[in-house]
Image: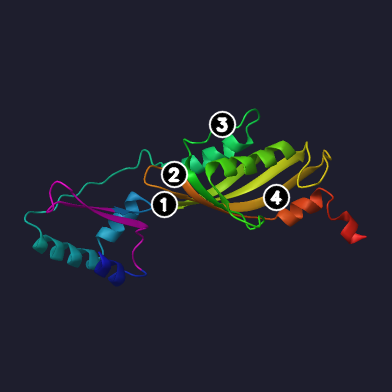
């Protein structure tokens, strides 16, 4: 496959490849190659480089390889769904759920706005409660990119200040900011670690905390 990728550079339109070995039969390999469309798959199949690699593949096999054209009817990134569910749950009014179905107890949170990382689910819940006590808010998830055990989510946060927040008295002001969060998952599909990037300084400005500095 590496040879085919190199030889077809600039010609192929494959977007994803996956090779797996049957745990119960070490001689059985399955390869999945993803294309934007069936027509693109057929065009790639007709490349001379594809035919050459196919003949080399046949020489390695005990019998003729079998081919299956799959039409995707469902494709879910379960970790991405868990990340999206977190953004929905944290913004839901009422009592904050335990979240232990989404996070490990040893969750580690990296937020550049905090002097120290937040470690442990209980500490992370206290951080979330601080935001929930200060604002009625909601996240709009714009896009997610999943790769390996990580999911990157680009979002917009919109809130109305209903309580004190970091020394700023309740103002009733509306505020908005954009940001990105990367979540790392364990093998059980729970969030182990999180990295946040957002404009807290811009948020403080919208809440009036910087007014005295501008005078």
Q: Single out the mark in the foreground, 3 or 4.
A: 3
User: Whole-percent x and y of residue 41?
Assistant: 30, 55
Q: Residue at x 63, y 36 (%)?
A: 91
Quickly name the residue at label 3: 97
Q: Residues within 10 Å of mark 2 (few under 14, many from 20)?
A: many
As measured in the structure, the alpha-carbon distance from the residue carrying label 2 to the one carrying label 4 is: 24 Å
User: Whole-percent x and y of residue 159?
Assistant: 72, 41
Q: Residue at x 48, y 39 (%)?
A: 102
As measured in the structure, the alpha-carbon distance from the residue carrying label 3 to the one carrying label 1 is: 24 Å
As measured in the structure, the alpha-carbon distance from the residue carrying label 3 to the one carrying label 4 is: 24 Å
Earlier along the polypeptide chain: callout 3 or callout 1? Answer: 3
User: Whole-percent x and y of residue 144?
Assistant: 51, 49
Residue contact at pointers 1 and 2, CB within 8 angstroms: yes
Q: Secondary structure at mark 4?
A: strand
**Render colour scheme:** rainbow
Quickly name the residue at label 2: 79
Quickly name the residue at label 4: 177
Residue contact at pointers 3 and 4, CB within 8 angstroms: no
Q: Secondary structure at mark 2?
A: helix
Is 186 magenta? The answer is: no
Magenta-colored span: 11-32
Residue contact at pointers 3 and 2, CB within 8 angstroms: no
Earlier along the polypeptide chain: callout 3 or callout 4? Answer: 3
Extreme residue toward the top, this view = 94
Is 20 magenta? The answer is: yes
Q: Quadrant of the N terminus?
A: bottom left
Quickly name the residue at label 1: 149
Q: Is residue 126 above or below residue 144?
A: above
Question: Viewer-proximal residue, 99 or 75?
Answer: 99
């Amino acid at each position: 496959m590496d040879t085919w990728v190199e030889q077809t550079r600039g010609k192929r339109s494959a977007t994803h490849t996956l090779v797996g070995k049957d745990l119960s039969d070490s001689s059985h390999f399955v390869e999945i190659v993803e294309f934007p469309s069936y027509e693109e798959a057929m065009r790639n199949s007709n490349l001379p480089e594809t035919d050459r690699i196919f003949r080399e593949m046949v020489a390695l096999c005990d019998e003729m390889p079998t081919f299956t054209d799959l039409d995707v009817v469902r494709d879910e990134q379960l970790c991405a769904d868990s990340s999206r569910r977190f953004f929905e749950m944290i913004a839901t009014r009422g009592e904050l759920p335990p979240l232990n179905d989404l996070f490990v107890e040893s969750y580690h949170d990296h937020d550049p706005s905090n002097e120290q990382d937040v470690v442990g689910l209980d500490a992370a819940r206290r951080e979330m409660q601080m935001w929930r006590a200060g604002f009625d808010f909601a996240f709009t998830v714009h896009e997610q990119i999943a790769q390996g055990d990580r999911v990157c989510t680009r979002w917009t946060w919109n809130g109305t200040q209903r309580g004190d927040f970091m020394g700023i008295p309740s103002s009733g002001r509306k505020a908005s900011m954009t940001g990105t969060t990367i979540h790392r998952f364990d093998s059980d599909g729970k969030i182990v670690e999180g990295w946040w990037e957002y404009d807290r300084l811009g948020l403080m400005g919208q809440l009036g905390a910087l007014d005295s500095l501008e005078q």
